[in-house]
Image (cartoon, coloured by chain):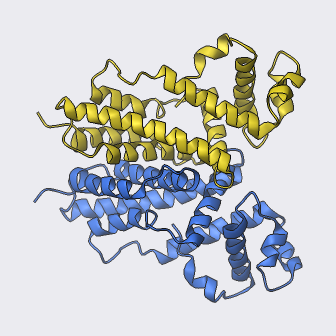
Chain colours: A yellow, B blue
C-alpha cells in the first residue's frame, strides 16, 4: 500500500526531502532504532530544519504516514481501466509479491512496528483507522463495480472488502514477524476465493 | 490463541505465579509500559525471585510466550470430537468473538506489540514462527480430516490453513490497532468461504 518510488528520485521541496529521508532511515533502522539524528543523516540540509517543521520523532512519523497515504490515494485511480476481477487481484498481488526487494521488506517491518504503536497511542490508531478505511472502501467499490458488471455474484461488497483488507494486513504482519509466512500459498488460496466465492460461473 | 484462564486462578508453582503476574501486567500496561517492577507489583512473592529466574523483561516475556503456546498445544485437542467443519469454525470464531471482554482486548493489544518486536529481534521472530506453524499445522490437519471424511472438497489443506492463519492474525492486528476492524463482517465472510470454497455441496 505504497506508491512511494517516484518522489524519492526527485523530491519537490523541503517537506518531500524530509519524507524521503524518513523513508530511508525507516528502511535502515526500523521504528525501534529510529532517531531524528538518523533521519538527519539521510537529509541533505540542516537537521535544525527538521526540528523547525516537526516537534519530535512521532510527530514526524505521523506526518510521514499521512503523506504516504495521501500519495496512495492520489496515485491509485478509483476507476481503473482493468476489469473489476483483475483490479481486485492487484489489491492482493502487490503486497504479496515474491521475492520482495530488500528495501520493501525492511519498510514492511517498519510499518508493522508503526502499526503496533496504535495499540497504546491514539494518534497512530487514528491514522491506521483512516488507512484501513481507505483500503476497505476502495476494495468495496471494485467489488460493487464487478457486481454491477455481472462479473461477480451478488455478494456483500463490505464483507468481501473486510476479508481482503484483514488478510492483506495479516500477510504483511506475518511476513515481517515470522518465518512461517507462505505468500505463494496465500496468493493461490485468495485466487481460488475470488474464482469460487466472487466470480460468476460462466 | 490462549487457553489462559484456568491457571490464573490457581497457579501451581512459582513459575506459574510469575507467568500469571506477567499476564496481568501486560493487560494493564501493554508491552511499551511494562517493567519488571510492574510485573513484581502483580506478584505475591519477592521481586528478587523474578530476577533469580529471568535476566530481564524480554527474557521473561519470551518465556511467557512459550508458556502460553505450550498450554495452547496441551489444551486444544488435536482430534476434536466435533466434525471438521465445526472444528474449523471454532478456529476463527474464538479470536473473532464479540464483544471482547476488556481483559482479552488489552491482552490482544499487548500481543500485537510483542509480535512487532519480531521485526527486529530474532528471539521473538523464532517464537512467532513456531506459533504460526503450530496454528497452521493444526488447521491443515482439520482440513485434511474433512477431506478424508468427504465433508470438504479436495482442496490444498496447507493453502486453506495459510489463508485462515493469515486472516486471523490480520484480524487480531486490526482489532488492536484500528477502529475500522469489523469482526462481524469478517466472520460472515469466513463462514461464506468455508461453505463455498471448502464444504462439498450436498
- Say which residue appears at 81% left-offset and 77% top-offset: B41
Quick check: can you spot residue A34? Answer: no
- Nearer the observer, B25 or B143: B25
Displayed quadrant of residue A31: top right
In screen coordinates, is B193 left or right of B111? left
Front residue of B40 and A81 = A81
Q: Quadrant of the C terminus of chain B?
A: bottom left
Seen from the viewer's position, the closer of residues A40 and B13 is: A40
Number of callouts in the render?
Answer: 0
Quarter occupied by residue A103: top right
| Residue for point 82% across, 68% down | B36
Q: Is residue B84 visible?
A: yes
* Vertical arrangement, residue B162 with respect to residue A78, above or below: below
A135 up-or-down from B95: above or below? above
Q: Position of residue A172 (x, y in %)?
A: 53, 41
Lateral position of residue A16 relative to residue A182, left or right: right
Residue B17 is left or right of residue B139, and the answer is: right
Across and down, in percent, residue B176 comes to 57, 56
Query: Is residue A142 shown above or below A4?
Result: below
Residue B23 image point, x, y percent: 67, 72
Q: Which residue occupies the foreground of this view, B187 or B156?
A: B187
**What's the residue at 40%, 33% (across, down)?**
A138
Q: Residue at point 37% right, 36% down?
A: A139
Q: Give residue A14's position: percent from left, percent from top.
A: 76, 16
Amino acid at each position: 500500500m505504497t506508491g512511494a518510488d517516484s518522489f524519492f528520485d526527485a523530491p519537490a521541496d523541503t517537506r518531500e526531502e524530509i519524507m524521503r529521508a524518513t523513508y530511508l532511515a525507516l528502511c535502515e533502522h526500523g521504528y525501534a532504532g529510529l532517531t531524528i539524528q538518523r533521519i538527519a543523516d539521510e537529509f541533505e540540509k540542516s537537521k535544525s530544519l527538521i526540528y523547525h517543521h516537526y516537534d519530535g520523532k512521532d510527530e514526524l512519523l505521523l506526518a510521514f504516514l499521512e503523506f504516504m497515504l495521501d500519495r496512495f490515494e492520489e496515485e491509485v485511480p478509483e476507476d481503473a481501466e482493468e476489469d473489476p476481477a483483475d483490479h481486485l487481484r492487484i489489491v492482493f498481488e502487490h503486497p504479496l509479491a515474491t521475492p520482495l526487494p530488500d528495501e520493501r521488506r525492511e519498510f514492511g517491518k517498519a510499518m508493522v512496528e508503526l502499526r503496533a504503536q496504535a495499540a497504546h497511542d491514539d494518534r497512530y490508531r487514528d491514522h491506521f483507522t483512516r488507512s484501513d478505511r481507505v483500503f476497505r472502501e476502495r476494495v468495496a467499490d471494485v467489488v460493487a463495480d464487478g457486481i454491477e458488471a455481472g462479473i461477480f455474484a451478488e455478494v456483500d461488497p463490505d464483507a468481501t472488502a473486510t476479508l481482503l483488507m484483514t488478510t492483506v494486513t495479516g500477510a504483511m504482519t506475518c511476513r515481517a514477524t515470522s518465518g512461517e509466512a507462505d505468500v505463494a500459498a496465500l496468493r493461490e488460496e485468495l485466487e481460488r476465493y475470488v474464482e469460487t466465492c466472487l466470480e460468476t460461473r460462466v
